[in-house]
Amino acid sequence: MTAIVNMHQAKSQLSKLVERARMGEEVVIANNGHPLVRLVPVTEKPKQRPMGLLAGQMWMSPDFNDPLPDDYLEAFE
């Protein structure tokens, strides 16, 4: 069930509306009957990506971390 409250009511009952949203109820704040925002609870932990998600899809050169040649920076002058 969606609770639609006007701006004035939301100002005076914000803590109650936040608690209702935390309990899973959809709370919409409206101005002159036009919905403006929806209160939603913040998730406690962000979703973790599974390990190895891109395994086999990337390649790194074996000399990736080797020092650059001495004349490398001369090319940019």
Image (cartoon, grey):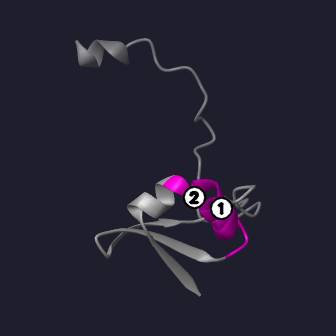
Taking the image as shown, residue 47 lies to the left or right of residue 34, namely right
Does the stretch in magenta take in 18? yes
What range is drawn magenta here? 12-24
Q: Give the numbered dot on residue 45.
A: none
Residue 61 location in percent, x, y?
Answer: 58, 44
Which residue sits at x=65%, y=61%?
A: 16
Q: CA distance from mark 1 to mark 2?
A: 5 Å
| Residue marked by disc 2 | 13
Quadrant (top left/top right/bottom left/bottom right) for the C terminus: top left
Q: Is residue 41 left or right of residue 4?
A: right
Give the percent coordinates (x, y) of residue 7. Answer: 40, 61
Q: Are marks 1 and 2 in contact (CB under 8 Å)?
A: yes
Q: Main secondary structure of the magenta part?
A: helix
Closer to us: 30 or 8: 8
**Residue at left 37%, top 18%?**
72
Q: How many marks?
A: 2
Q: Residue at x 25, y 18 (%)?
A: 76
Disc 1 marks a residue whose amino acid type is Lys
